[in-house]
Amino acid sequence: MNGTGTLEDLRMNGTGTVALGGTQTVTDVLTFSMGLLDLGDNDLVLTSAASSAVVGGNENSYARTAGNGSLIRPVNGSNYAFPLGGSTYTPLSISLVTGPQDNFAARVQNGVSGEYDAPGVATGGMATSDVVDRTWVVSEEVAGGNTANITLQWNATDELVAFNRGTCSVANYDGTDWSPSATAAAAGSGPFTRTVSGLGVFRELCVTDEDATLNEIGTSMNSMEGSTLQVFPNPASNVLFIDGVEFDPLRPTVGLTDAMGHQVSLDMAIRSNTRTVDVNGLPNGLYILKLLDQQDRSHQIRVVIAH
């Protein structure tokens, strides 16, 4: 399908693959029944804000995103489907929780990298175990102001060795680090799904278990092997203590982000090699504490605040 143009409806209902040769816009309904639509490096843009503007999607019919092209559609409510895949069908859905209608773009690519320069441009080492071997790249046209729940779907054949779907989470990449959400069992008996709730920063997403190492930072509850650093209590209700002879209390090396990836202001006090963090005013939930020790080793630990 060469050139750039506008279609009222686009229905995939045949054998084989249709390749886009330019960006195409669909003003009404996009339907997937049979056959693949290969986007390549071109975008497929939907203009209807109705969740029903996308129909169908299955392992035999979806938008294949092996290049840089994305499926773009307005999201203004719950369960907006993005029937995507690379070599397999690995779709996602987006439900807007807060904020105005916005155009969301999504694509999926094989592999999970420890680092990305631009969105979807892998520059780090690739994961070889403990993850689903897919990266979902999501963005919004107007950054900021929206939160959303995103559900990712995959197949057993997409999982790398040692991946534990009984204790897995969705991790989002904030431009520097991967931050995992709360750990739980995947839903379904094949295909499988996991949902991340209240996400406010949209970039790369992946599905990981507690033993994965992403961006040289473990995703387990305590990823400080080889260090004398201690973080306690966890869960914390009023005060969180960071202690250890390897931690220099004079360096500004403590960061805390919430489940949406937003930096949280910290009220800290320093006593010798112990730093106390006042968490009394933070809402209950999961947070990511990021530390840097005297050896310039990065550490990341999930901290639960429960008053």
Image (spheres, helix red, strand yellow):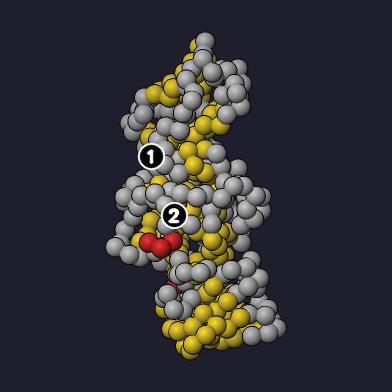
Give the amino acid type for the residue marked by disc 2 in the picture.
Leu
Seen in the picture, residue 92 relative to 299 is either above or below; the reply is below
Q: Quadrant of residue 120?
A: bottom right
Q: Quadrant of the N terminus?
A: bottom right
- Which residue appears at 48% of the width and 17% of the height? 244
Residue indicated by mark 1: 285
Seen in the picture, residue 7 relative to 89 is either above or below; the reply is below
- Which numbered tag is attached to residue 80? none
Q: Disc 2 vs disc 1: which is toward the camera?
A: 2
- Dot 2 or dot 1: first in sequence order is 2
Residue indicated by mark 2: 160
Residue 162 vs residue 42, the one in the foreground: 162
Q: Is residue 65 visible?
A: yes
Judged left or right of residue 231, residue 18 is right
User: Measured from the top left, where is residue 68 in percent x and y?
Assistant: 64, 66
Seen in the picture, residue 48 relative to 176 is either above or below; the reply is below
Mark 1 burial class by Cα count in 10 Å: few <14, some 14-19, many 20+: some
Give the amino acid type for the residue marked by disc 1 in the picture.
Gly
- Which residue appears at 40% of the width and 42% of the height? 210
User: Measured from the top left, where is residue 275 in percent x and y?
Assistant: 49, 18
- Which residue appears at 54% of the width and 18% of the height? 246
Q: Quadrant of residue 107?
A: bottom right
Residue contact at pointers 2 and 1, CB within 8 angstroms: no
Seen in the picture, residue 16 relative to 105 is either above or below; the reply is below
